[in-house]
C-alpha cells in the first residue's frame, strides 16, 4: 500500500485542570490548546507536527450546545481558528467546529482516516475540552471573567445540528440527557424483571468497576473509588437527579478537562521522525443512528444501531470480541453501558473491565469531548502492550448516534475503507416503533417513567404510556408530591390510569 495513504494515530494528549482560583485557571481555549501541545509532545515530533497540521477538528463546547451550560463570560467567535493560533498551526487551512454529540470524536477520526486514504488530508487533529468547573466556581463567587475572542472568519461545521428531541418531548420537559436516560433505565429494569431496589444495587455494582478504574487514574476527577452501595444509595451528597439515577450515576460535566489526538499517514510520520512505537492503527469502525426521537423507538431497552455498529466494526477489523484486550464503553449513565453490553454480547462483569479511563461519572464527562479522552487513553493502553487490541464505543444524543473503533499498534493489512453506513442504516430506519399521538385520551398504562428531582426532592414525572390500541404518548403526571414520592419508592411500570390533554397541550396521566 502507498504509505502516504495509510492513516495512523501518532499523538495523544490529555489535561485535567484543578485550579481552584478561577482568575488563575486557564480559559477554555487555553486549556484545549494545552492538550494539543501535549499530543504533539507525545508524538516526539513536537512543534514540527503542529506546524504540519492541515486540518483541525474541534469538538463543540457545551457552552455552544445547551442553555444549561451557556457561558456568561463569552468565548471565541471562531474556536478552531483561535486554537490554531495558539498551536502555531499556520498551515491548517481547514478549520472545523463540530455539531454536538458524544459520538463525534470517533466519527471525526473515521472521516479523517478516510480522507488520508484518499489523499485529501495529510495531518489532522481532533481536539476539544471544557472548563465548566471554573465557569461554575466563578459564577458562584461573583468573579467576572472575559473569555471573548475574535480571531476572524467562520469555521466549517461537521455533524448533524438537529436537536435530539421533538416538540412534544420538549413540551413535557424531556429535553436533555438527564431527562431521557432515566426513561431507558426504568425500561431496562422492567425488561430484566427486577424490583426498584434490586436494580438500584445492580447499577451500583456496574459502576463500582468504573469508579475503581478512576481511582487509579491520576487524570480522573472523582478518585474516591465509590462502592456499589455508595453509588446506589441516595443521600444529601448523592441525591437523585432523575430517578432512578443518583448523582453518582450521572456524567460529571462540571469539570475542566481537554484532550487531543493527532493523526497522519505512515509516510508523513516517517518524514517527521515519529518513532513506530507511537503509531496506532484504526482497524475497524462503523457509524449508525437509531430513530432520532425516542418517541419513535421500538422499545426503550435496546439499540439496533449499537448492535449493527459493533457487528460492522468487528467485520471490518476481521476479529471478534474475544480478541480484544481493552474496552471502553460510553458510560454517560448506566443504561448506555447496559444496552451496549446487551447488544455486543459483553458480560457486565467482564474481567477485562468496561473502561480504560474510569467513565464519564468518575473520570469526567467533558461535554462532547469525552471520547477524545477515551481514544487517547486507548492509544496509551495498546502502546503499552504491543499487538493488543482495544475497542471504544461512542454515543451521541439519547442512545441515538453510535460509533465505534478498534485500535492497535499492529499494522493494518488492507486499505482503510469502512462500509458505507447507508448500506446498514436503512435496516434500522425500517424497523419502526409504535404509532405515537400528541392527543391521547382515556385508559392507558405506563410504558416507562422517570421522576425528576430538584434540591427539595421529587419535582415532576415524565412517562411514556400506551393507549389500549397500543398507541404511544408522552405525558407528565399531576403535581402531587405524594404520588411522585410513591413513584420513586414503588414500581409503576405497567400501572393503569387515565390520560387527558390540558389547556397547554400537555398530556397528564393520572395513575389509578
Image (spheres, rainbow, N blue to C red):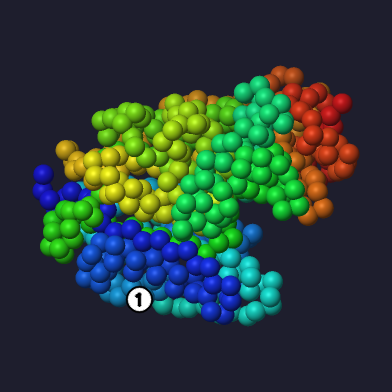
Q: How many badges with numbers are in the image?
A: 1
Q: Residue at x 21, y 59 (%)?
A: 122
Q: Residue at x 63, y 60 (%)?
A: 67
Choose top left, top right, bottom left or bottom right for residue 155: bottom left
Residue 369 picture location, percent across and down: 46, 56
Residue most extreme to the top? 469
Label 1: which residue? 85
Q: Is residue 483 left or right of residue 246?
A: right
Q: Is residue 97 above or below residue 186?
A: below
Res 222 visible: yes
Residue most extreme to the left? 2
Q: Is residue 245 above or below residue 12?
A: above
Residue 237 picture location, percent across and down: 72, 53
Q: Is residue 148 left or right of residue 501?
A: left
Residue 328 picture location, percent across and down: 43, 42
Quadrant that contains the C terminus: top right
Residue 313 picture location, percent across and down: 33, 35
Quadrant that contains the N terminus: top left
Q: Is residue 117 left or right of residue 469?
A: left
Callout 1: 10 Å neighbours few (<14), some, many (20+)? some
Res 177 visible: no
Q: Is residue 350 left or right of residue 51?
A: right
Q: Residue at x 34, y 41 (%)?
A: 390
Choose top left, top right, bottom left or bottom right for residue 284: top left
Q: Residue at x 66, y 31 (%)?
A: 199
- In the foreground, 179 or 510: 179
- In the foreground, 53 or 186: 186
- In the foreground, 116 or 172: 116
Which secondary structure lies at badge 1? helix
Amino acid at each position: 500500500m502507498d504509505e502516504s495513504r495509510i492513516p495512523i494515530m501518532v499523538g495523544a494528549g490529555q489535561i485535567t485542570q484543578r485550579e481552584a482560583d478561577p482568575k488563575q485557571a486557564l480559559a477554555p481555549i487555553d486549556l484545549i490548546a494545552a492538550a494539543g501541545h501535549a499530543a504533539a509532545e507525545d508524538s516526539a515530533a513536537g512543534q514540527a507536527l503542529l506546524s504540519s497540521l492541515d486540518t483541525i477538528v474541534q469538538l463543540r463546547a457545551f457552552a455552544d450546545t445547551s442553555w444549561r451550560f451557556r457561558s456568561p463570560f463569552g468565548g471565541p467567535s471562531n474556536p478552531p481558528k483561535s486554537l490554531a493560533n495558539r498551536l502555531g498551526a499556520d498551515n491548517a487551512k481547514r478549520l472545523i467546529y463540530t455539531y454536538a454529540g458524544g459520538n463525534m470524536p470517533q466519527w471525526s477520526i473515521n472521516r479523517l482516516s478516510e480522507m488520508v486514504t484518499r489523499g485529501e488530508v495529510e495531518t489532522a487533529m481532533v481536539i476539544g475540552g471544557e472548563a465548566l468547573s471554573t465557569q461554575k466556581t466563578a459564577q458562584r463567587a461573583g468573579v467576572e471573567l472575559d473569555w471573548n475572542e475574535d480571531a476572524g472568519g467562520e469555521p466549517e461545521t461537521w455533524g448533524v445540528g438537529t436537536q435530539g428531541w421533538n416538540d412534544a418531548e420538549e413540551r413535557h420537559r424531556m429535553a436533555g440527557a438527564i431527562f431521557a436516560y432515566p426513561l431507558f433505565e426504568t425500561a431496562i429494569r422492567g425488561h430484566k424483571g427486577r424490583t426498584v431496589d434490586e436494580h438500584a444495587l445492580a447499577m451500583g455494582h456496574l459502576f463500582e468497576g468504573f469508579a475503581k478504574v478512576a481511582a487509579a487514574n491520576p487524570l480522573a476527577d472523582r478518585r474516591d473509588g465509590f462502592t456499589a452501595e455508595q453509588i446506589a444509595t441516595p443521600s444529601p451528597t448523592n441525591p437523585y437527579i432523575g430517578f432512578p439515577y443518583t448523582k453518582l450515576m450521572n456524567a460529571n460535566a462540571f469539570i475542566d478537562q481537554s484532550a487531543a489526538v493527532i493523526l497522519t499517514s505512515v509516510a508523513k510520520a516517517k518524514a517527521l521522525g515519529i518513532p513506530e512505537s507511537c503509531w496506532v492503527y484504526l482497524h475497524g469502525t462503523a457509524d449508525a443512528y437509531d430513530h432520532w426521537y425516542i418517541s419513535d423507538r421500538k422499545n426503550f431497552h435496546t439499540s439496533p444501531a449499537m448492535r449493527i455498529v459493533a457487528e460492522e466494526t468487528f467485520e471490518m477489523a476481521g476479529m471478534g470480541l474475544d480478541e480484544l484486550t481493552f474496552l471502553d464503553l460510553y458510560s454517560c449513565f448506566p443504561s448506555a453501558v447496559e444496552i451496549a453490553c446487551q447488544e455486543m454480547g459483553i458480560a457486565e462483569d467482564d474481567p477485562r473491565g468496561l473502561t480504560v479511563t474510569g467513565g464519564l461519572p468518575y473520570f469526567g464527562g467533558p461535554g462532547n469531548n469525552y471520547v477524545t479522552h477515551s481514544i487517547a487513553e486507548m492509544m496509551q493502553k495498546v502502546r503499552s502492550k504491543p499487538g493488543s487490541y482495544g475497542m471504544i464505543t461512542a454515543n451521541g444524543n439519547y442512545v441515538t448516534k453510535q460509533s465505534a473503533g478498534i485500535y492497535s499498534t499492529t499494522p493494518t493489512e488492507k486499505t482503510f475503507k469502512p462500509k458505507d453506513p447507508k448500506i446498514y442504516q436503512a435496516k434500522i430506519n425500517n424497523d419502526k416503533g409504535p404509532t405515537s399521538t400528541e392527543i391521547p385520551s382515556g385508559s392507558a398504562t405506563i410504558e416507562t417513567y422517570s421522576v425528576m428531582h430538584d434540591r427539595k426532592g421529587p419535582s415532576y414525572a415524565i412517562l411514556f404510556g400506551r393507549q389500549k390500541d397500543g398507541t404511544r404518548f408522552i405525558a407528565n403526571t399531576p403535581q402531587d408530591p405524594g404520588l411522585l414520592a410513591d413513584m420513586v419508592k414503588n414500581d409503576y411500570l405497567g400501572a393503569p390510569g387515565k390520560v387527558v390533554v390540558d389547556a397547554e397541550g400537555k398530556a397528564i396521566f393520572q395513575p389509578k
